[in-house]
Image: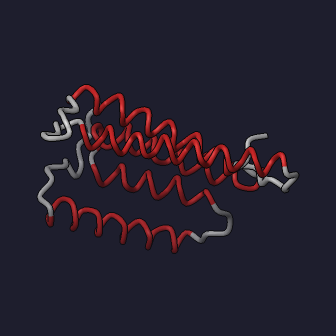
Amino acid sequence: MIDREMLAGLVFMAAGIVAVAVGWGYGFGSFAALGAGAMPVLVGAGLIGLGAVQLLQARVAMRAGEALVSAFPRAELRPLAVILAAVLVFALLVDRVGLVPALVALVGISWFAERGGRGVELAAVMVVVVLLIVAIFYWGLGIPFRLVAWRF
């Protein structure tokens, strides 16, 4: 069983390793004249260090006999899987069908992460989310999304 503390440490370390690897390709420079990769490398090294400390604390707690909480309790697996599926579907659809249908799919799929929602609430959330996202990113920031584009 992997507990939450261990998972957090591993995620920090993985993100740090990726940041160091990407930043190293940009060139670190020197301490007198830092290059473009200095910040990702330094932040990545910090994340690796924090992850190692987190893993060490989890190991000490495990040896002390503390009760560990599972990283993925059974009750939380369904919402996690549904939300991840909704984000994946959004990513796959946004280029093919446009921003608005992809947002509708995102909200519609993620609605099933919890039980007990009504159809009227779903429709209201869809309308509000679509209007807010379009207003902020399309009109406000001017990002050139295709709002509706039915190409498969």
Find residue 123 and report its image quarter: bottom left
Q: Nearer the viewer, residue 46 or 74?
A: 46
Q: Is residue 119 above or below residue 92?
A: below
Residue at far top of view: 25
Which residue is at 19% across, 47% downward?
A: 146
Q: Give the image location of residue 126, x and y in percent.
A: 41, 65
Q: What is the quadrant of residue 16 in the picture?
A: top left
Q: Furthest residue to the right? A: 65
Q: Is residue 104 left or right of residue 145?
A: right
105 vs 69, left or right, is: left
What residue lies at 52% left-to-right and 52% top-to-bottom? 109
Outermost front residue: 32
Residue 83 drawn at (x, y percent): 54, 51
Q: Position of residue 36 (x, y in %)?
A: 17, 38
Which residue is pictured at 78% across the width and 52% down the height?
61
Residue 130: x percent and y percent? 32, 64
Task: State how the image is colored.
Answer: secondary structure
Quadrant containing the N terminus in the rendered view: top right
Q: Nearer the viewer, residue 12 or 119?
A: 12
| Residue at the (51%, 39%) spot, across then down | 13
Callout count: 0
Quadrant housing the C terminus? top left
